[in-house]
């Protein structure tokens, strides 16, 4: 199998282009490619809250499987369907998500707050979601991601593990920035055109979930491989 992968990579590498394209052109290609991919990050609104609450210290595929189980609840995955569960029922649905007991508790607290204070919806600003509500497990980065998915609002570029890795592989950030997500964010915000901020993080996160994973990127199938420095120069 490994040998077959190597052969596929070698065939694909012959298509690597010598001429460079700009970062913005490459980004626009990626955004286009993402329009045909439905990734885990594309789940919307309150569902993203649950997804984000579960994803800490848990692999994407384990979080996705737990989300699927929650979607199979009677009436689907909604605030009220979560509210009907006991902690132990929710806990059973989350296993084997990391820290599932603690996360079951957090998710029920989130659902209760949204039901009682926000009429079964989520607030419309990062400030409310993060600072005022003090929801368990929701920091500023996750709050921005939820704003993005739920309301299409971007007040900065969100750099999660996927955005950090892919930006570096595509040569969009410096070697120094590769060490710290915050440094990547600063460099990206310097050149990514503002009109692309709303799509940027969601496009890269979904691309990481579908093609450019940490350990086994699908380079031989990747639609960006012809101009990817990580693939073409190794
Ligand atoms: S070619 Fe490989 S490393 Fe480059 S963007 Fe595609 S999946 Fe990622």
Image: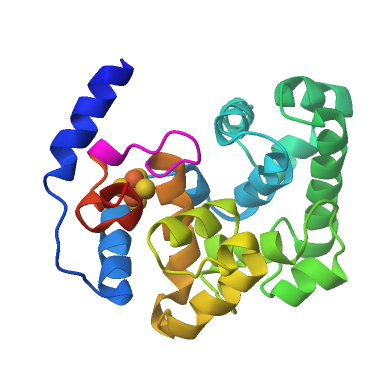
Of 154 and 14, the residue lying toward us: 14
Position above or below: 143 against 60:
below
Which residue lies most toward the top here? 1
Q: Residue at x 81, y 25 (%)?
A: 91
Which quadrant holds residue 8?
Answer: top left
Q: Position of residue 159 (x, y in %)?
A: 59, 63
Q: How many marks?
A: 0
Which quadrant holds residue 96?
Answer: top right
For residue 218: magenta?
yes
Which residue lies most toward the front here? 234
For the record, the magenta segment spans 211-220
Q: Position of residue 77 (x, y in %)?
A: 62, 38
Residue 228 is left or right of residue 199, and the answer is left
Q: Residue at x 68, y 51 (%)?
A: 49
Residue 45 is left or right of residue 34, and the answer is right
Of 84 and 157, the residue lying toward us: 157
Position above or below: 167 against 25:
above
Q: Residue at x 68, y 35 (%)?
A: 58
Position above or below: 161 against 24:
above
**Quadrant location, the N terminus:** top left
Residue 90: tell me if it is visible: yes
Residue 35: tell me if it is visible: no
Of 120 and 148, the residue lying toward us: 148
For residue 162: magenta?
no
Q: Position of residue 216 (x, y in %)?
A: 43, 33
Q: Residue at x 66, y 72 (%)?
A: 124
Position above or below: 56 against 26:
above
Q: Position of residue 169 (x, y in %)?
A: 42, 56
**Magenta span main SS:** loop
């Amino acid at each position: 199998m490994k040998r077959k992968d190597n052969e596929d990579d070698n065939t694909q590498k012959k298509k690597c282009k010598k001429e460079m394209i700009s970062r913005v052109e490459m980004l626009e290609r990626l955004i286009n490619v993402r329009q045909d991919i439905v990734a885990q990050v594309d789940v919307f609104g309150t569902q993203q809250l649950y997804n984000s609450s579960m994803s800490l210290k848990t692999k994407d595929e384990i979080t996705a499987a737990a989300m699927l189980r929650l979607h199979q609840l009677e009436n689907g995955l909604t605030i009220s369907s979560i509210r009907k569960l006991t902690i132990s029922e929710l806990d059973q649905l989350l296993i084997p998500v990391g820290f599932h007991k603690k996360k079951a508790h957090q998710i029920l607290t989130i659902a209760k707050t949204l039901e009682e204070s926000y009429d079964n919806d989520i607030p419309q600003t990062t400030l409310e979601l993060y600072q005022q509500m003090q929801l368990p497990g929701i920091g500023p980065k996750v709050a921005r991601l939820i704003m993005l998915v739920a309301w299409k609002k971007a007040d900065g570029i969100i750099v999660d593990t996927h955005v950090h890795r892919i930006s570096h592989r595509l040569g969009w950030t410096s070697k120094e920035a590769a060490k710290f997500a915050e440094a990547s964010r600063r460099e990206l915000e310097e050149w990514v055109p503002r009109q692309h901020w709303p799509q940027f993080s969601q496009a890269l996160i979904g691309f990481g979930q579908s093609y450019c994973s940490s350990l086994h990127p699908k380079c031989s199938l990747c639609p960006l491989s012809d101009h990817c420095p990580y693939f073409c120069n190794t």
